[in-house]
Each structure stands twice: as structure tokens, then as C-alpha cells.
Amino acid sequence: MNKYENTVTESDKNVDTFKIASKIRDLAISHNKLFEESIPLIASENLLSPLAKEMLITDFHSRYAEGLPKERYYEGNRFVDEVELEAIELAKKLFNVDFADVRPTSGTVANLAVLKAFAKHGDKIATVSLDDGAHISTAEFGAFGVRGVNPVFMPFNRDEMNIDIDNTKKVILNEKPNIVLFGLSLFLFPPPIKELADTIKEVGAMGWYDGAHVLGLIAGGKFQDPLHEGCNVLSASTHKTFPGPQHGILLASGMEENQYKKLRSGAFPGVTSNHHLHAMASLAITLVEEIEFGKKYAEAMINNAKALGESLYNKNFKVLCPDKEFTESHTIAINVHDLGGGEICAKKLEESGIIVNKNMLPGDKSAKHPDGIRIGTPEITRLGMNKSDMNIIAEFIKRILIDGIAPSIIKKEITDFKRSHNKISYCFYEGENPYKYYRLV
Ligand code: DSN
């Protein structure tokens, strides 16, 4: 008999359903343990600080606050309003912009809000193709399709892993897109916004930046500053390099008030009803922490990514872009075709306690069987790891993928290494274990 069964009386008719609830809780606890014992290298994931996490279990979670602060459709919002107004001001300060909306509930929802505000059915939007690393929002089966806009593809230099400036200028001049969208899911280098800004202006297009992957690097001033380089609007999720809750954000600068109004109405009532107030409060806390700790954190993520790239390259992995120090971001990409492909390599790593994702590389045809794996440093950096830890991780990866060491042999070493690195950094209450869980019974 387990401890949950103990709490249920013989006469309880719902004993079976309670067992299912107990099982779900046990699964969550097992999941926490999995990450406590694994090296987390997914480029789009991160950990919440203790203060930001606390917000997720407040009563904000239970409430509605449609509309704007002080203009709600519900009562009971007086403290929610204060939080939202703070969050907006914090975001404007951190990113040095005129406009922020903290209501999108995810990055894709933020993208849909931009599309709702500024695009109409049949419009053309210039973007990098999915094959070259764009986000699924830009696909016909994604947000672009929902709005009925047509992608126009910007040529991509696969050696440089960046937009081909000269040929893209030609595409923009020929196609005259309504919007030019920058941003990637395999985001190694800053796209050439400044270099394309005049061309974008010449055809009267709007510059849009999907900053989901690099929001924390932008916040730390270490990547690029899209809204001061030629873009008008930035949409993002808030939980990748920006170490906040699963949520979204819209930022803008240099627009007319009526365009900000359109953007606000894109967010609500366009693509959200309620905006997940607990997550918004958690975002507000993260904005404060980024103002305080964001610069050092962004720098450390990039340094770790370069160090990991170099160490893996020196161990004979085909890390992309060796001539460009592998990356200017938190992400590196490796071509593992010769080692069985991305799917097999990612699975082998997971069995040994290293979590990455298989990823299409430019030219790949199948998202399920791509040649690449993508590796990111947001979470390991958040746990205080540094250059010497990158060498240790690279050696683990080599022993698994090149030397063929069995998971049963290496897993304990990886677990021990990870267990000694489970203290959060770059936030208030540094040193807490972010994988900690609480049990009621
Ligand atoms: N596209 C996902 C990723 O980059 O992991 C997130 O939206």
C-alpha cells in the first residue's frame, strides 16, 4: 500500500480516480528527477528563478483580467493591474523601447498577434525557409497559414548560417513583401538587419523580428538590438535565453500610436482572451532579475556555447561554422550524419543522461530524420556551469557518440556530475535547487 492509498477511506467511491491523480503526481516527480540527473542542452528551454516560480502558484492563476489595466471587464483586478503596469514599464526599460505588451501567452501567440495587427490575407512576408532554420510559425501549416499570408523566402548562405544579403536585397526589391521577418529556431548569428534596412524601407515594408530564441541575449545587450537596427516590432516567447515563464511578449519602437493600438488589439481580443496572470507576474519578476543579472548571464551563455563548440570540434565532431567561432548565440549545431543521424544520436544521448534535440540542418529534407543535433547552453549556464564544465560535457558526448560507451557505464558519471550542478544562478535566491518539488501528502 502506498502513502496515497493510506489517505483514501474504504468508503471512498473515487478510490480509482484518486489513484490516477496520485500516478500523475508521481510522474511529475519522476520528471523532476529525470532533469535533476540529466544534462539539459535543449536550446529553447530554461529554468525559472525561485521568485518567478512562486508566482505560478499564486491566486493570479485562478483569475480573469481581459482588456487593459484599469479598463477591465472583470472586478477583482486591482493588484493584477499594478503587476501588469509594472511589467510593461520594466520591459520598456530593459529593452529601451516605447511599447510593450505582456499579454501574449506564448511566442506563437505573440506571432499571431503581429499577424493579426499588421498582415491581411494574401500579403507577402519575406522569411527564411523552414529548411534553413525558421520557426514553424512561418509555415503554411502554422501561424502564416492561419492568417493566409504567403511566404517569400530570403536566400540563406548555408556556410555562413545567415541570410545572403545581396540576393535577399534582390528578392525584396522584386517581390515587394509587406513585411520582412527575421528570426530563427536554429539561431547561430545575428541576421543582417542594418544591411537590409534601406531596402526594406525602399519597398515600404515593415521589419519584424521573432526574438524568441535570443530575447535574453538581446536583454543582456550581447547579440543585436533589432528595434534600433531597422525592425519595428519584436515578438518572442519568454522562456528560452530569457529565463522566464512559458509566456510571450510584444515589443515595439518608432511607430505611430495607432499602430500600437493595432498591436494591443492584436493581442486582445485578437488572439487571447485571458492572458495567464500568474505567468505575467512571473514574467514581471524575471524582467526585474534580467535588469539586475541579465548582462552577465547573456555573456556566460554565449561564452559557454563557443567553448562547447570548440571542445566538440577538437574531438572531431562536425560542429557548424568553425571559422566563425561556431556561434554568436547560445546555440551550436552539429552534423551527425556519419554517426547515424540526429534521431539516433539524440536518443543515445538521452539514454545516457544528456538531453538534446535532433534538428534539421540546411538542406535536410526530413524533420524526423535530420542530419543534425542542436545544443543550447541556457539551462546549464543558469546552473552556474563554465568553460571547464563545457569540456567535461564535450567529453561525455564524445564517449557516447564516438567511442560508443554504453549508457549503463556512463550514466552514473553523468548523474553524479549533474547532481553537483543543481544550484540556480543569475537571480535572487541564488543557490536554490530549481528542480525541487513539494508534496502535500
Ligand atoms: N521551435 C521550438 C524550438 O526552437 O525548440 C520552440 O518554439
Image (cartoon, rainbow, N blue to C red):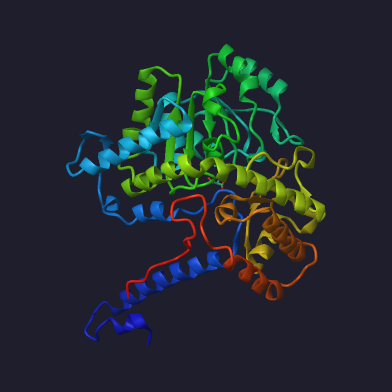
Observer-nearest of 298 and 282: 298
Q: Residue at x 24, y 86 (%)?
A: 10
Name of the residue lying farthest toward the top: 202
The quarter holding residue 114 reads: top left
| The C terminus lies in quadrant | bottom left
Location of residue 145 in the rendering, given as x and y in whole percent from the top left corner: 50, 35
Name of the residue lying farthest toward the left: 75
Q: Is residue 112 visible?
A: no
Q: Is residue 377 visible?
A: yes
Q: Judge whether 277 appears above or below 355 on screen.
A: above
Q: Judge whether 271 appears above or below 181 on screen.
A: below
Count of labels in the image: 0
Location of residue 67 in the rendering, given as x and y in whole percent from the top left corner: 27, 35
The quarter holding residue 135 reads: top right
The quarter holding residue 109 reads: top left
Observer-nearest of 288 and 323: 288
- Horizontally, residue 141 falls left or right of residue 192, namely left
Q: Judge whether 262 appears above or below 13 on screen.
A: above
Q: Judge whether 24 appears above or below 150 on screen.
A: below
Location of residue 133 in the rendering, given as x and y in whole percent from the top left corner: 64, 40
Observer-nearest of 209 and 434: 434
Location of residue 325 in the rendering, given as x and y in whole percent from the top left corner: 75, 41
Observer-nearest of 351 and 70: 70
Q: Residue at x 30, y 41 (%)?
A: 83
| The N terminus lies in quadrant | bottom left
